[in-house]
Amino acid sequence: MVCPAGQIATNVSDGAKDKTDGCSSCQPGTYSPGGMEISCTASNCTAGQIATKTGAINTIDGCTACAIGKYSAGGSANSCSNMNCQSGK
């Protein structure tokens, strides 16, 4: 079984119907280069970004900037947090 980029092999038992049968997409916050990987690897978005893409193919694929008024430490975070600014700042 050879999975495409963004997917991992989740069904490694006998009985696959074709070379990609049993492949599943990585969840947001993770990625896979494809092939015969059996687990997804954590994304590495920069600070101020979150990992939003299902089936990411590398460490920064699917990294998206947080909206104004929100923040993220980056990495494999998949949601932004509200900023807690003082009034007038």
Image (cartoon, rainbow, N blue to C red):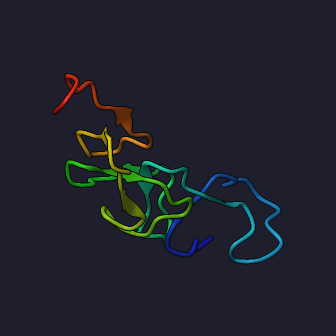
Q: Position of residue 61 (x, y in %)?
A: 38, 68
Decide if residue 41 is on the left or right side of residue 18. left
- Front-most of residues 36 and 69: 69
Give the quarter of the image for residue 1: bottom right
Q: Can you give x and y, in whole percent of width and height, for residue 55 in the image?
A: 54, 63
Front residue (pair 21, 46): 46
Q: Nearer the viewer, residue 10 or 76?
A: 76
**Is residue 35 found left or right of 58 in the rendered image?**
right
- Which residue is located at x 43 percent, y 69 percent? 57
* Rendered location of residue 10, percent (x, y): 64, 52
Q: Residue at x 58, y 71 (%)?
A: 3
Going 27% across and 45% down the picture, which residue do you hit?
75
Q: Picture quarter containing residue 32?
A: bottom left
Residue displayed at 43% across by 48% down: 29
Identity of the residue furthest to the left in this view: 89
Q: Please give left or right for residue 71 compared with residue 67 in the image.
A: left
Which quarter of the image is occupied by the C terminus?
Answer: top left
Q: Is residue 65 left or right of residue 25?
A: left
Q: Which percent across, then down, holds residue 49?
A: 30, 52
The image quarter in which residue 26 lies: bottom right
Toward the viewer: 12 or 50? Answer: 50
